Image: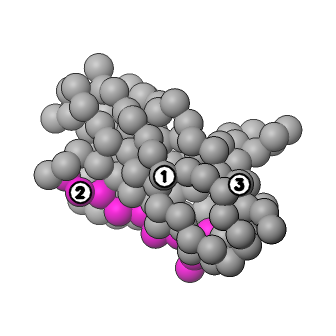
Amino acid sequence: QVQLVESGGGLVQPGGSLRLSCAASGSIFSIYAMGWYRQAPGKQRELVASISSISNTKYVDSVKGRFTISRDNAKNTVYLQMNSLKPEDTAVYYCNVVTIHGANYWGQGTQVTVSS
């Protein structure tokens, strides 16, 4: 089992920045990939960014050049630095972990609202 605790969401004006953090505990030795998903009202959950155990990263096209995912293996934490935020980035952001056994674990979600 892996437990995930997220932090860092909030309200920000367009063009602003936020950094999300997700700390993992439990069976952390089994973690392979870590990532962030988001779900806006009335829309499906989508993958925003992911990072593998060897730090290969992937991003959805809409955030490329604005968001950066990183992980600190010593702290078992994954981060999502979000710059140049737009109103369309408003969503609940969920941390996700995939283990070497193929199991998925989710954080509780953190609200990000981009509005003037």
Residue lying at 81% horizontally and 40% vertically, measured from the top left:
41
Label drawn at residue 8: 1
Residue lying at 63% horizontally and 44% vertically, measured from the top left:
111
In the rendered structure, which segment of residues is drawn in magenta? Answer: 63-73
**Sequence order check: which comes first, mark 2 or mark 3?**
2
Which residue is identified by label 3? 113
CA–CA distance in space, label 3 to label 1 = 12 Å
The answer to whether residue 65 is left or right of residue 70 is right
Residue closest to the far top: 1
Residue lying at 56% horizontally and 71% vertically, measured from the top left:
17
Residue lying at 73% horizontally and 61% vertically, measured from the top left:
114
In this orientation, which residue lies closer to the viewer: 35 or 21? 21
Magenta includes 39? no
**Quarter of the image containing the N terminus?**
top left
Q: Indicate the position of residue 97 as horizontal and vertical percent values.
A: 39, 38
CA–CA distance in space, label 1 to label 2 = 16 Å
